[in-house]
């Protein structure tokens, strides 16, 4: 019998045992909007199954276990032989296997593949973002490999498989394989053209021996890696298999694992190449052009991942406030807290709506959509990933002291939240990429203006924002210094256009007023009191 002093009251039930996909109205509407009618029931069914698994107590416990038991590097076996392996907790393998079986690496060979994968990515992020790195790398490797039809024919069936095989053995013997990536070096950072790893041609055509060091190697337990190295003809892309076809380990010397702020369940390594065997991907001297398809895909995953983190943070905050009372009323009925929650919900909805729109453009594949992606992906990557940390922190504050306690799950979201802004090119890289596209590809700006123009006339604040954006574009003075401001406006105007077209009127009104019309403050919870905040909060509440 519990002592009277230990009776628990006024605490919300755990947000567990629910369908993460079905509880997300915004994501569900986006899937309906972008998936063809004949395919919709199938996609809803698979996303519903993943959503129920993601909200289960079992998978949430696996996520906790994977983060509390970080990966461990083993450079040598007990006899002193070099093995260079990373040991993961069994929960990590269970989660990664579930992600593979859910099709998170299989977008390229399924109808509506990018939208259904994008929705699954948003859902799966809410379990544990740590296992998303190998899933993202594997998915993104496909367009790079397609520059070499022979390599693509060999590797693509393994990479798009829904079977997870964790064993380190020759890839031809495996029913499924995972890929990692290594571009960043100590001296280079985002400037990949400063790459110092060298590639010496071998006797067999297309094969090389690599020597060098990669400062960040994602997912070092993968079966293969795409890396950049300097060949006689210039910077070139290479495929480095973890295990050679004769069963011997390739020279892949893991020096240490990074001790990271977040993403604790995942391993990121420093790796040495010293006579490492590799196959060339694409032509010599065209390494950046070859690997750029991989970079674009992973940048979109950064947007999706941040949208998923924001959604889980907002879901936790609204759920907590819907059950907890203070000063005689539920927190969701308190005007000021309702304002905070509505503001957070707006940010989450705008991120999800934009992310799924970009995924739909990948499925379309037409020239107009490809042009839109070239400017919209870096703009979205810049803005959505930067909005994730303040959303996570504010959501944790909605839980008060409980949100600062590890068991709530919010600290893990807070630690994870900056990652996507840093990964695959930090903010300045994205902003400068937007400028590069504007200067070199006028068709991209035309595609963007046609997209946002579909909402022209529906909201005067959006119309004014489009006009102001064009005015900024006409002024080239100090444009590089203004690149972040310009990129932010590109993302906000696109989000506003999409919400005006597809979101409920109260959501679009609140977003355009606060983000485009200047009727909002710098912190969350500063929306005008005249808005329908209650319905915005209710739209974001998980029905649990």
Image (spheres, rainbow, N blue to C red):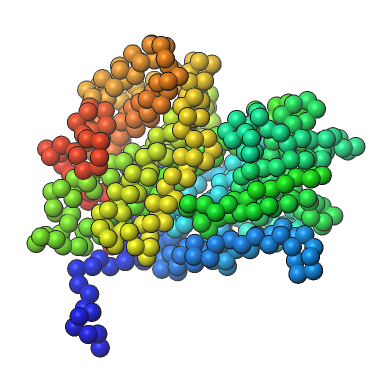
Residue at position x 28%, y 45% from top?
344
Q: Is residue 381 positioned above or below 85 on the image?
A: above
Q: Residue placed farthest to the right in the image?
A: 203
Asked if residue 444 can be seen in this view, the reply is: no
Where's residue 368, x and y in %?
Answer: 49, 23
Say left or right for 534 vs 120: left
Q: Residue placed farthest to the left in the image?
A: 328
Front residue of 533/422: it is 422
Where's residue 218, x and y in %?
Answer: 61, 47
Q: Is residue 77 positioned above or below 301 on the image?
A: below
Q: Which of the image's four quarters has the N terminus?
A: bottom left
Front residue of 370/405: it is 405
For the image, the number of numbered tags is 0
Q: Residue placed farthest to the front in the image?
A: 187
Where's residue 159, x and y in %?
Answer: 65, 48
Where's residue 42, x and y in %?
Answer: 47, 52
Residue at position x 22%, y 22% from top?
460
Asked if residue 132 can be seen in this view, the reply is: yes
Say left or right for 349 vs 417: left
Q: Which of the image's four quarters has the C terminus?
A: bottom left
Residue at position x 42%, y 20% from top?
481
Residue at position x 78%, y 50% from top?
251
Q: Residue placed farthest to the bottom in the image?
A: 1
């Amino acid at each position: 019998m519990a002592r009277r002093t230990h009776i628990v009251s006024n605490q919300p039930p755990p947000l567990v045992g629910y369908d993460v996909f079905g509880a997300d109205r915004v994501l569900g509407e986006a899937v309906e909007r972008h998936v063809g009618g004949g395919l919709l029931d199938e996609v809803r069914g698979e996303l519903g199954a993943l959503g129920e698994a993601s909200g289960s107590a079992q998978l949430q416990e696996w996520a906790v276990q994977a983060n509390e038991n970080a990966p461990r590097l083993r450079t040598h076996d007990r006899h002193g032989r070099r093995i260079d392996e990373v040991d993961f907790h069994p929960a990590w393998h269970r989660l990664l296997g579930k992600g593979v079986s859910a099709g998170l690496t299989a977008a390229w060979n399924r109808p509506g593949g990018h939208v259904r994968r994008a929705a699954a990515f948003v859902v799966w992020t809410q379990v544990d973002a740590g296992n998303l790195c190998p899933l993202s790398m594997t998915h993104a490797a496909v367009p790079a490999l397609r520059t070499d039809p022979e390599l693509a024919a060999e590797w693509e069936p393994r990479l798009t498989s829904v079977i997870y095989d964790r064993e380190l053995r020759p890839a031809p013997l495996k029913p499924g394989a995972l890929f990692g990536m290594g571009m960043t070096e100590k001296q280079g950072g985002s400037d990949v053209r400063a790459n110092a790893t060298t590639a010496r041609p071998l006797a067999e055509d297309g094969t090389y021996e690599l020597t060098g060091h990669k400062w960040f190697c994602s997912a070092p337990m993968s079966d293969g890696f795409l890396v950049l190295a300097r060949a006689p003809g210039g910077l070139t892309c290479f495929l480095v298999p973890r295990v050679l076809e004769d069963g011997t380990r390739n020279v892949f010397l893991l020096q240490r694992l990074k001790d990271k702020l977040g993403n604790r369940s995942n391993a990121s390594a420093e790796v040495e190449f010293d006579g490492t065997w590799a196959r060339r991907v694409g032509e010599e001297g065209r390494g950046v052009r070859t690997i750029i398809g991989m970079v674009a895909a992973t940048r979109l995953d950064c947007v999706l991942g941040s949208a998923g983190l924001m959604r889980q943070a907002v879901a936790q905050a609204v759920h907590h406030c819907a059950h907890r009372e203070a000063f005689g009323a539920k927190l969701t009925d308190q005007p000021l807290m309702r304002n905070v929650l509505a503001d957070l919900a707006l940010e989450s909805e705008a991120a999800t709506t934009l992310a799924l729109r970009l995924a739909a453009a990948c499925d379309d594949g037409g020239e107009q959509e490809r042009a839109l992606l070239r400017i919209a992906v870096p703009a979205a990557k810049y803005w959505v990933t930067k909005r994730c940390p303040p959303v996570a922190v504010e959501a944790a504050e909605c839980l008060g002291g409980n949100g600062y306690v590890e068991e709530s799950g919010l600290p893990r979201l807070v630690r994870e939240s900056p990652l996507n802004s840093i990964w695959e090119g930090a903010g300045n890289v994205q902003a400068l990429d937007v400028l590069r596209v504007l200067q070199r590809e006028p068709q991209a700006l035309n595609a963007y203006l046609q997209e946002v123009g579909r909402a022209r006339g529906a909201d005067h604040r959006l119309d004014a924002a489009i006009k102001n954006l064009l005015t900024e574009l006409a002024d080239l003075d100090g444009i590089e210094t203004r690149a972040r401001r310009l990129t932010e406006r590109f993302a906000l105007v696109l989000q506003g256009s999409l919400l005006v077209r597809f979101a409920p009127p109260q959501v679009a009104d609140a977003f355009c007023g606060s983000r485009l019309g200047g009727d909002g403050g710098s912190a969350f919870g500063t929306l005008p009191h005249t808005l329908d905040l209650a319905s915005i909060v209710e739209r974001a509440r998980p029905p649990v």
